[in-house]
Image (tube, rainbow, N blue to C red):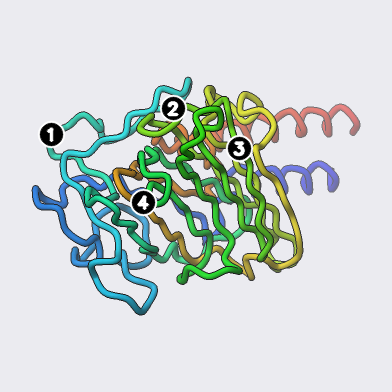
Amino acid sequence: MKTTSLALSCVTAMALGSSVSSAATITEYFNNYGTTQANLETFTPSLGSGWAGNWTRPGGGTVANYGDYVPGATVSPTATGYFSAGNETDSGDGAFGSNAFGDKRYNTHRATGGLTGEIWISAAYVVGTSASNGTVSFQLDTNAFTSTATRVSVSHSPNTANPEVQQFYYNGAATNLDRTVWNGAQSPNVMMIRIDMDYSGSNDRLSVWTHPTNVSSVAALGTPDFQASSANVFGTSFDYLGIIAGQASRIDSIRISNDPGAFTFVTTGVVPEPASIGLFGLGLAGLLGRRGKRRD
């Protein structure tokens, strides 16, 4: 019976206590910021849910160089399995981006509260038409745009055969990919990012899926467009998300989670009921209990 009791204890801990103290679900739909375009940093407190702070500038530069809330702008991708909570067709909805010609909005970042473990991030976005300024970029765990920052960028290319260029910066190294299968400028798409971080911060991995057509399951995502790993890239926790959206570009529906149901949350906007996780664990515990009794 000692073996069975130990198994029951382990399963119960897994099922009912799997949400560690740092587990979180974070959202930003850019809703209800008003009807006037303005720098996102001017909204205090910032809206959204689950963040550890407001949208802020990483330091230096003028306010005009940083990101805008754009009222009435929406991004509605059609990837299978992706549901945008908050109904992005609402008249009061907005997005992050810029309308000014030739204007590239630089890094605006927000604290996540320090996440660990397996972290999923998703966002809806549109790449602008400008080859030089129509970039969308996600800065991962950095509060400054630097050459060593780990980030994922998508930009428009004037080459019609390769309408978009994907840039990955991981631990100071850059990888550029031309994509003929992507939708090109002004087409709404989804970015899926997974960060695997152990709790000591000594073995980190980054996986990125861009323009996935099916996000109904991890398997449906297929092979990542980019994957890399090395020691301690994100430190001991994931503390910041930065975003950039250039001319006519948009970012919307940001979701971040390291909760046990993180993938479901970032793809649907719905947090799985804890009861279902608990019932699964209790059912497994019951099976182990019956097995132990038979052995006795």
Cα separation, mark 4 vs mark 2, equals 22 Å
Front position among marks 4 and 3 = 3
Mark on residue 245? 4
Mark on residue 82? 2
Cα separation, mark 2 vs mark 1, equals 21 Å
For the residue carrying disc 1, how many other residues have a C-alpha within 10 Å: few (<14), some (14-19), or many (20+)? some
Q: Which residue is mark 1?
A: 91
Q: Position of residue 234 (x, y in %)?
A: 62, 65
Say if 198 sits above or below 213 in the image: below
Q: Which residue is mark 3?
A: 178
Front position among marks 1 and 4 = 4
Q: Amino acid at mark 3?
A: Asp
- Front in this rendered view, residue 19 or 126: 126
Label 3–label 2 contact, CB within 8 A: no
Front position among marks 4 and 2 = 4
For the residue carrying disc 3, how many other residues have a C-alpha within 10 Å: few (<14), some (14-19), or many (20+)? some
Secondary element type, mark 4: strand
Cα separation, mark 3 vs mark 1, equals 36 Å
Query: Which badge, 2 or 1, comes first in the chain's sequence?
Result: 2
Cα separation, mark 1 vs mark 4, equals 22 Å
Query: Which badge, 3 or 1, comes first in the chain's sequence?
Result: 1
Q: Amino acid at mark 4?
A: Ala
- Quarter of the image holding residue 296? top right
- Front in this rendered view, residue 154 or 235: 154
Is 11 on the left-hand or right-hand side of 92?
Answer: right
Mark on residue 161? none
Residue drawn at point x = 51 percent, y = 34 percent: 159
Label 2–label 1 contact, CB within 8 A: no
Q: Amino acid at mark 1?
A: Ser
Query: Which badge, 4 or 2, comes first in the chain's sequence?
Result: 2
For the residue carrying disc 4, how many other residues have a C-alpha within 10 Å: few (<14), some (14-19), or many (20+)? many
